[in-house]
Amino acid sequence: MPAFLVKRLLQSLAVFLGVSLAMFLMLRMAGDPVQLLLGEEGTPEDIARLQVVFGLDRSLPVQYLYFLRNALRGDLGVSYHHGVPAMELVLERVPATLELAGAAMLIAIVLAVPLGVIAANRRGGVLDRLFLSGSLVGISAPPFWVGIVFILVFGVMFRWLPTSGRGGWEHLVLPAGSLALYRLALFIRLVRSGMLDVLGQDYVRTARSKGLAERAVVFKHALKNTLIPFITIAGLQMGSLLAGAVVTERVFAWPGMGRLILDSIQKLDYPVVMCWALVTAAIFILINLVVDISYSFVDPRVRSG
């Protein structure tokens, strides 16, 4: 187990460094933030002076090494436009994004597991076909489009729920629901497929032949083994939710990282975008590390993989 943990930690560190290098290069290829900041009125002297202030006059390898050195000290730079540390700006908005992503994942898991079990146990029936058709719609519909539809129906037509801002649970329903729909559809199909596979195994037939109640066979034997791959996929989806919530946050004016990052990308605010990418990557890597460790306890063969 210790060797497995060390191996996974080293892999996580390598991924983190890879993300930082890729984002660094992509941002440098996007354009010159100094020219964008000064506009057409900026003189060559002003541009050269600001490039020195921001450290953009150095070569790319030197800039990256300086970035890594400062990052190890907890300094990810100062926002070019806000004039405050980038880490401070991003961390102020992380709780709102985590709240939205967590609520969406909770909705998807709580609904998907029982619906997937029901669909598998009624294979070919009305409920099975209804859930499969509904999940196909959920997978096909982009979250931002679902969000707009939710706003029109529940916010404008019926006026049941607020369409923007962050406050009580009522502010969370529409944005979390629009983000959860795709995961709900995906998880229903995943649980249904896993249940159908497990219900055909010999040990399930043996359990039935011993006279166990169908409820015990389904929930104690079949569902437990179905949930092993489900945990892995759910962990990956939680990571993608954090990054994918950017557009949904914009649609619902949710005060998370989304609005800040879209504005920062438009203004080429390097420190803020780099900080967001690293914080998101760190959360994503941490979630997958926890999932892998949890999975290794359930299936010891993973440790030797």
Image (cartoon, rainbow, N blue to C red):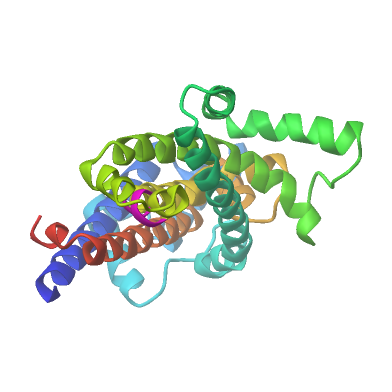
- Magenta stretch secondary structure, dominant: helix
The boundaries of the magenta stretch are: 220-225
Examine the image and state in which quarter residue 131 appears.
Answer: top right
Residue 232 image offset from top left, x and y in percent: 34, 51
Q: Does residue 157 appear left or right of residue 297 in this picture?
A: right
Quadrant where the N terminus sits is: bottom left
Residue 85 image offset from top left, x and y in percent: 53, 69
In-front residue for pair 88/157: 157
Q: Is residue 101 something that shows in the picture? A: yes
Identify the residue shown where x is 45% and y is 62%. Answer: 53
The magenta stretch spans residue 237: no
**Would you place residue 52 above or below residue 146 in this image?**
below
Q: Does residue 252 appear left or right of residue 28 in this picture?
A: right
Residue 198 image offset from top left, x and y in percent: 30, 41
**Would you place residue 42 above or below residue 103 in this image?**
above
Identify the residue shown where x is 58% and y is 46%. Answer: 111
**Would you place residue 136 above or below residue 112 in this image?**
above
Identify the residue shown where x is 74% and y is 29%. Answer: 149
Q: Does residue 56 appear left or right of residue 49 in this picture?
A: left
Residue 45 image offset from top left, x and y in percent: 48, 50
In-front residue for pair 120/252: 120
Quadrant where the C terminus sits is: bottom left
In-front residue for pair 129/252: 129
In-front residue for pair 117/2: 117
Identify the residue shown where x is 38% and y is 61%. Answer: 287
Q: Is residue 41 something that shows in the picture? A: no
**Would you place residue 235 above or below residue 186 in this image?**
below
The magenta stretch spans residue 221: yes
